[in-house]
Amino acid sequence: MSVRGSYLFLIIIAAAAALIVFVAVRAYNRRLDRIASGELHDTHSSVPEPGTAVGAVYRTVLMAIVVVLLLTVSAMNGRLSALQNTAGNLQSNVNHLEMELSTLRAQAEQSLRRVTSSSTEILSTDWASRTAEVEFSAELREYASDTAVTLFLNGREIPLSQVAPGMYRARFTAGLFEKYDLPTICVTEGGRTVVEDSDFPETLFWDYLPMPGFSCQFSSDVVMGKLKYDGSYMIDADHTEDIESVMLTYLSGGRALKTLDLTAETLAHQTVVLEQGLQLDKDLTFLTEIATRSGFRIVEQSTMIYEASPDFEDSDFLRILDQNGNVVWEENYGKS
C-alpha cells in the first residue's frame, strides 16, 4: 500500500467512525425523547448508549490505524530496500563508467602521441665509475625524412638515430645513481617540435642491485599497555648472485634489540619466524644491511609493526654506501 493510499484509507475510516458516532448519538437521543413522552418504556433496546458506541468505534478505529501503519511501514521498508539496491546499482554503474572513461582517455592520449613505444636496456655496468652503458629506443607513429628525435635527461640532449622505418635508437653512458627527473622526448619535423614524456627509468641502480624487500605476515595488539606481536617474514631480493651477506637488526624506540645473520635464508628465499620475547616500545623496526660483491652496502630501515598514535613518526630511510663508506644514494636519512 502506498503512503498516499494509506492516508486516504485513514480519512475514510475516520469519516466512517464519525458517522457511526453521530448516528448512535442521534438514535439514543430520539429513544430518550420517546421515553420522556411516554411513547416507549425504559426497557431493553437495541440502540446502544453513546459512550458504548464511542468506545467501540474508538477501538475499531485504533485497530484500523495500527493495521494501516504496519502496512505503511512494511511498504516503506520495501521501498527503502529497493532504493538502496538502486543506489548500489547506480554506484556500480558509475564506477564502471569511470573505469571505461579512464581507459578511453588513456587510449585517446596514446593515439595522439607521436612516440608509440620506447624501451631502455642496460648493456653493461661499471660499478667502479658508477655508470652504465644504456641503449634507448623509441618508435614513432608517423615520421618523415627530416624527422629528428632527441631524448632529454636532466638537461642533457641525446640525439637518436633512425635504425629502421619509424624506429630510432641511441647508445650512451648514464649514471647508475643519478636521478632522472621528468625525462622527455622531442620530435622535430618540418620546423615543428612536439615534446612528450618519456618512460626512461628515474634511477638505474634499483633494477641492478639486490635491493631488500619483504613479504610479511604480521599480527599485533596492545595488551595492558604492551605491544604484542606475532608472525613471520621473508626477505625478497633480486640479483642474489651479487649478495655477500645480509644482516637484520630488530629495533624498537631506536634501540637495537637483536641482530641476525639472514644470508642463507635470503639466498634460499626462506621464511623467518619473528622471535618472541622482544621488549618492544611502540614499534618493531627492521634495520637491514646487505653487503654486495660489487662493493656496495645497502642499508634500509623499515617500520614493520607500530602502535598507532598521533605522535608516532616512523624512522624509515634508505642509504647506499660504496666500499669506502661514501654515500652514493640516500632517501629520508636524518629526516626531522
Image: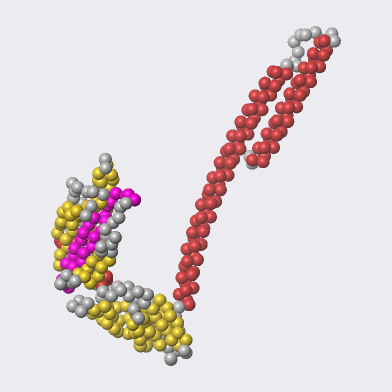
Residue 201 visible in the shown view? no
Residue 159 rendering spot, x and y as whole percentages:
35, 86
Quarter of the image where one finds residue 174: bottom left
Dividing the image into 4 quarters, which one contains the N terminus? top right
Extreme residue in the front direction:
336
Residue 257 rendering spot, x and y as whole percentages:
17, 52
| Part of the protein shown in magenta | 285-310
Q: Is residue 309 magenta?
A: yes
Quarter of the image where one finds residue 301: bottom left
Identity of the residue drawn at 71% across and 27% down: 17
Identity of the residue drawn at 25% across and 51% down: 283
Q: Is residue 146 left or right of residue 298?
A: right
Residue 59 visible in the shown view? yes
Dividing the image into 4 quarters, which one contains the C terminus? bottom left
Prevalent SS, magenta region = strand
Identity of the residue drawn at 32% across and 78% down: 120
Q: Is residue 76 left or right of residue 226?
A: right
Q: Is residue 114 magenta?
A: no
Extreme residue in the bottom direction:
145
> Camera-side residue: 121 or 180?
180
Residue 292 rendering spot, x and y as whole percentages:
17, 69
Quarter of the image where one finds residue 164: bottom left
Identity of the residue drawn at 21% across and 59% down: 287
Residue 302 rendering spot, x and y as whole percentages:
26, 59
- Position of residue 317 relative to residue 84, above or below, is below
